[in-house]
Amino acid sequence: MADGHHAWFAPTFEISAAVLIALCLALAGSALMRARVMARVGVERSLTALWPRLAVAQFVLFAGMERAEGTHATLPGYAVQIAVAFVAAVVLSLFARLLARCIDSASEAGQYLERLFAEVATFIPRRSVWCPSTLAVQIGSRRFVRPPPHS
């Protein structure tokens, strides 16, 4: 492989291995979701429960990426990854709380909209009747053009 005729083989193998690992992880995640392992856990609403999980995942993936690139991860790099995990946990937990509130108030909002549309429907005339006085009021005085003065 050192002669250059097969220089494409190593990058292709690395990409194929990464795609295979991603496919295996996607299949494992799909199997966990079908088995309902993570159904209605509620961990996403709690910052103290979500942050350690995200920090460990971020830490491990960062170390793996640095290892794959051939560089060494430093302590400031790990600190940044933990801070990123904290910010992501805050955003995700706030969004999960917002979604929970929306789900809880969905039935109330539906009842309000039904009531609103039921009341508005009574004010809409079934058949429009136009008479000359109605048309005159709708047209208004803005469109009235005074004839030119006689000179």
Image: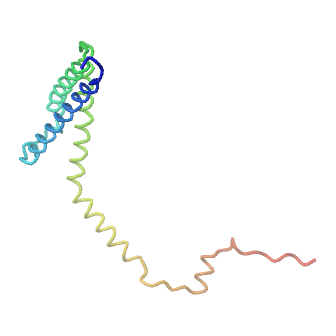
- In the rendered image, which quarter contains the C terminus? bottom right
When the figure is inspected, residue 139 is found, relative to residue 12, above or below; the finding is: below
Residue at left offset 23%, top offset 23%: 65
Residue 88 percent location from the top left of the image? 26, 32
- In the rendered image, which quarter contains the N terminus? top left
2 lies left or right of 36: right
107 lies left or right of 116: left
When the figure is inspected, residue 61 is found, relative to residue 42, above or below; the finding is: above
Residue at left offset 42%, top offset 77%: 124
Residue 91 percent location from the top left of the image? 27, 35
Quadrant assignment, res 32? top left
Q: Nearer the viewer, residue 47 or 28?
A: 28
When the figure is inspected, residue 90 is found, relative to residue 40, above or below; the finding is: above
Q: Nearer the viewer, residue 14 or 148?
A: 14
Residue 51 percent location from the top left of the image? 18, 29
Residue at left offset 14%, top offset 32%: 49
